[in-house]
Image (cartoon, helix red, strand yellow):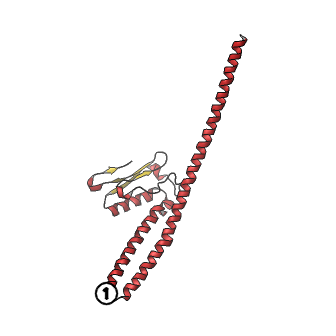
Amino acid sequence: MAMLWTVYRLRVNTLKRKQAALEQHQILLERHQVEIRALNERMIKAQEAERMRISGELHDGVLQQITSLTLRLGKVRRQVTPDSEVKVTVSGLQQELIQIGTDIRHLSHELHPALLQESGLPAPLSAYCEEFSKVRGLPVTYEADERVEELSPGAGPMSLPHRAGSAGQGRQIFAGKEGAGAACEVQPRGAPICVR
């Protein structure tokens, strides 16, 4: 009987040690998951800060230089005789710079849309769908349920899309919070595409 009792105690002690080790591993796993979430959040915030910085540099630096060059070319164009080939060349260069400036402005706004920061999710998504419709010539409609409307201005980047999708591919996907949904319905050549 003493021998059975000893074997029983050994098994109980072994099970207790394994249970304690399992609990330690569970605590360690939970701690690592919290650390990973914190790292992901810091990484997303760092990416958002870098987007803001690049957007600002494009808008306040490069775009201003292009505007200055465009104005200087306009001045040169006015100084050249009206029937000169140089005037045509300068006008062409000026138009190219205007288009480059427009493209950079759009890129700057896509990197960090100010409307998203100021008014939350619904207004910029609606505006993006309208702009997409005008630029691509495709009918686009925006719909959102009330949970998307609850997203507050300046909400964290985890809950907001940075870009509303790939404008060149005719589909837009948006994420809300806690299962909230929003979608743009794009109808290229009459065939509806609706992503929810």
Image quadrant in which you'd find residue 93 = bottom left
Q: What percent of the width, then of the height, locates residue 111?
A: 47, 61
- Look at the numbered disc 1 and give the secondary structure of its residue: loop
Query: How many residues crowd around disc 1 within 10 Å: few (fewer than 14), some, or many (20 or more)?
Result: few
The residue most toward the top is 1
Image quadrant in which you'd find residue 71 = bottom left
Residue depicted at 43% across the width and 52% down the height: 174
How many tags in the picture? 1
Q: Is residue 102 left or right of residue 193?
A: right
Residue depicted at 44% across the width and 79% down the height: 69
The residue most toward the left is 190
Q: What percent of the width, then of the height, locates residue 23?
A: 64, 33
Residue depicted at 37% across the width and 87% down the height: 78
Question: Can you say whether 114 is above or below 20 in the image?
Answer: below
Q: Specify the quadrant that holds the N terminus.
A: top right
Q: What percent of the width, then of the height, locates residue 92?
A: 34, 78
Using the image as rendered, state which of residue 134 and residue 35 is in the foreground: 35
Q: Is residue 92 left or right of residue 163?
A: left
Which residue is tagged 1? 84
Question: Can you say whether 156 is above or below 13 in the image?
Answer: below
Using the image as rendered, state which of residue 3 and residue 34 is in the foreground: 3
Residue depicted at 65% across the width and 35% down the height: 24
Question: Can you say whether 99 is above or below 196 in the image?
Answer: below
Q: Amino acid at mark 1?
A: Ser
